[in-house]
Image: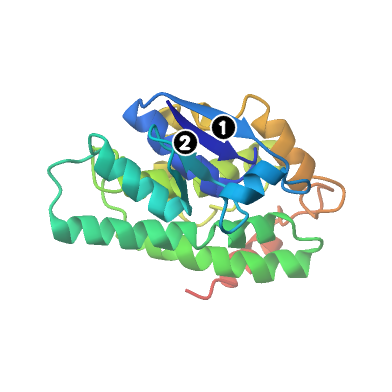
Amino acid sequence: MLKVVSFKICPFVQRVTALLEAKQIPYQVEYISLSDKPQWFLEISPNGQVPLLVTETGSVLFESDAIVEYLEEAYPALQPEVGSEQRALDRAWSYLASKHYLVQCSAQRSPDTDTLIERRAKLDSAFSKVELALADGPYFNGTALSMVDIAWLPLLHRAAVIERRSGYDFLSGFPKVKHWQQALLATGLAEKSVSADFDDRFSEFYLSDQTLLGRGENCNSNESDQACANSSCC
């Protein structure tokens, strides 16, 4: 059976486990602490990062981009009818998502309003682009779930947790992205692809009293929210 080595709130891991869930591929998860990485992990992880995927033959794959490509090639494809050009476009849109995972992490940890506005501008840049690309949906490529949906799921899931627990909406001003978020959450993949205590562990880190959002001092007024929206550098 496949095994994923994970850190509980890592978005790069969730991209992998969400694809496994979407394909209904059995797998095991082993969680580690990134502040106290076990020696066995360091010995098999070339970059010292999660996720790792241990294949059924015992090979250890690293980097989420490489892992999801392997899973798409080695197991039945989400969209087997998609041609080479569309696959290339899907990879590009997926990359736009994954390169903003750490951008979102940084924005969520903002200690004050000015920092949140500055960091949200970078995240808004990505949401603005995908807002223009989305059509009738409910998913990115229409009615069929694609690799793009899987790549954006960690971003959209975390935005939902932040909104539910703090009232702050990172997707305000992006109605198509918001509709897409709701459609993806309705699949159940978000909950299935994280640990049972994900919301609590996530909130402990990103909604602590060290963060603006955790203290409840967020951009909820119309004036502040407009300032956040206008800060987009798209």
Q: Which residue is mark 1?
A: 194
Q: Position of residue 3 (x, y in %)?
A: 49, 32
Above or below for 192 versus 84: above
Quick check: can you spot residue 158? Answer: yes
Q: Which residue is mark 2?
A: 17
Q: Residue at x 86, y 53 (%)?
A: 210
Mark 1: which amino acid?
A: Val
Q: Position of residue 42 (x, y in %)?
A: 65, 50
Q: How has the structure been colored for display?
A: rainbow
Q: For label 2, count other residues whose C-alpha is less than 10 Å away and answer few (under 14), some (14-19) or many (20+).
A: many
Mark 2: which amino acid?
A: Thr
Determine whether, in the image, residue 183 is placed left or right of residue 42: left
Considering the numbered disc 1 on the image, is that residue within a helix, a strand or a loop? loop
Determine whether, in the image, residue 83 is placed left or right of residue 102: left
Determine whether, in the image, residue 178 is placed left or right of residue 78: right
Residue at the far right in the pictured view: 209
Q: Position of residue 234 (x, y in %)?
A: 47, 74
Determine whether, in the image, residue 90 is placed left or right of residue 119: left
Closer to us: 30 or 114: 30
Q: For label 1, count other residues whose C-alpha is less than 10 Å away and answer few (under 14), some (14-19) or many (20+).
A: many
Quadrant of the drawing holding the N terminus: top left
| Whether label 1 touches label 2, CB < 8 Å | yes
